[in-house]
Amino acid sequence: MSGRIVGISGPTVLVEHPGLQLYERVTVGHARMMGEVVRLERDRSIVQVYDSTRGLAVGEPAVGTGTHFTVRLGPGLLGQMFDGLQRPLDSLRAEQGAFIQPGAEGSRPWAARALRFVATKKPGDSIRVGEAIGYVEEGAFRHPLLADQEGIIDRIRDGELDAEAPLAMLREGQQMFAFHDWPVRVPRPYRRKLTQFEPLVTGQRCIDFLFPLARGGSAIFPGGFGTGKTILEQSIAKFAQSDIVVYVGCGERGNEMAEMLDDFSSLADPWSKRPLMSRTIVAVNTSNMPVAAREASIYTAVTMAEYYRDLGYSVLLLADSLSRWAEALREISSALEEMPGEEGYPTYLASRIAGFFARAGAVETLDGRTGSLTMILSVSPPGGDFTEPVTQACLRTTGSFFMLDTDLAHRRHFPAINWFQSFSLYERDVSRHFDEHVAQEWSTLRQQTREFLQREASLREVVEIVGTEGLQDTDRLLMRTTEQIRRQFLMQNAYTEDAFSSPEDTLGRIRDILARHAAASERLAKGALLDELLKEGA
């Protein structure tokens, strides 16, 4: 059954089509553009279109599909690049050129890969939902295929994977396939959430040492223009100790995404030494793409991340940036003539952000595996104002907060993480893990480093009045040590080998700085002068 378009307002279309459901997928126009029902009236529905509505006309057809907006999940997603609607960009470029045409679908290249299915169940075995019936070797990863229904297996086959043919047949007549569709706005099920606090090593010394992040945790780093949000997030995507990385560029510049993809295709994972793209899924929705698809891109990415979490892997989701997603919500809400909240954002902004953050976590899956989904999201507050609604809504729900400081960025200190304003709620538990598995002095050195930085901040106020020469030698030594901590420890060049620092390297570097300070302090206490120590190179 089909209806017709009776009104168009930007990315939203008013259609006459009785029987539509909220969030049902609809194809509109002769070009069959994809849309989603976002409001229902008596005989009419408002559809949010994920393509550019330029050229769309009143009177063109609108057809409901009877399904919600879903993504295809299964083997072969790794190493792929999609847009916000999970359309494969490589195949679209091959079929249509450099620009996506309205209504484009694109072939599904991951479904056509030569993958071999190995069954671990046999006819007569009973299965339950979430239990593995076999696996596929997807590069270096063993990709288990999970049952989406329970029963007794009647037939199951080994051999080359066929996207259209069933893998197994149950005695009750149900079929199981290698691929399935999942609605992106519905969190995937699990048995229970875990409260484990294993560290997620990012390779950034400031984060791993001062504000550690846990697997299954969430973090935001807001910062103004030029504070290095994109570079920091891409560095974490390259070097973080996780099995799978899902990177979504939401409303960012195309040249930044092109640079990132070029790096990922040439660099190796420091943990496995394999190509970075072999463990990465990229969802690209740049600033010149339709705004409605930008709103969907975050949900598309998190659903694919949840899928690999359910397979028992540690998954890292990075989004750049959440502010662009919130701006898309604001634009769509304005087109729907909804009541605006603070700064024009919809009144449900905070609840949407909280619901999204709730999809992170370490879980016990339906078949008893342990998987985790960690979120690291950048926020771009206008003018660097951290009191704006998006940053404040994230602060209520995030577990880690890495404030990017404009003053540090102007001094060319990168990553520009302010060590006084940032925090991590996972610090106590994760630091205990570092004490046990790296060195017992980890927490002690971290506390000593923080004390040095805090004392230096107090001394700077004195220096502005009396100058450095007016300080005692012990205080001058402290100022010199903290300068070394900033320059040799907290700063990292994202374009050299120093872009990644293992926990052992991090510990060795700070231990050396603090040991030299302790030795110099001891000599000062015995009567040596600081100027003499500096001349000796001590």
Image (tube, rainbow, N blue to C red):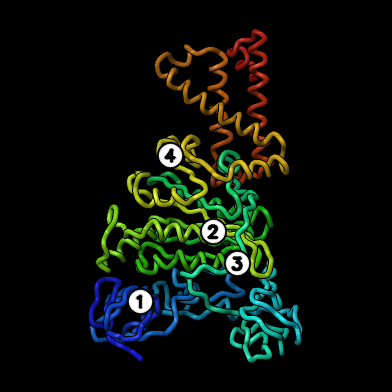
Identify the residue at horizontal 64%, vertical 10% (top origin).
528
Mark closest to the chain's N terminus, 1 or 3: 1
Residue 519 x %, y %? 68, 20
Quadrant showing the N terminus = bottom left
What's the CA distance linking mark 3 and mark 4?
38 Å
Q: Secondary structure at mark 4?
A: loop
* Image position of 268 with respect to 484: above or below: below
Mark closest to the chain's N terminus, 4 or 1: 1
What's the CA distance linking mark 3 and mark 2?
12 Å
The residue carrying mark 1 is: 37
Mark closest to the chain's N terminus, 2 or 4: 2
The residue carrying mark 4 is: 405
Crowding at mark 2 (Cα within 10 Å: few <14, some 14-19, many 20+) = many
Labels 2 and 4 touching (C-beta < 8 A) = no
Labels 1 and 3 touching (C-beta < 8 A) = no
Can see residue 276?
Answer: no
Residue mark closest to the camera, 4 vs 1: 1
* Image position of 90 with respect to 428: above or below: below
Mark closest to the chain's N terminus, 3 or 2: 3
Mark closest to the chain's N terminus, 3 or 4: 3
The residue carrying mark 2 is: 360
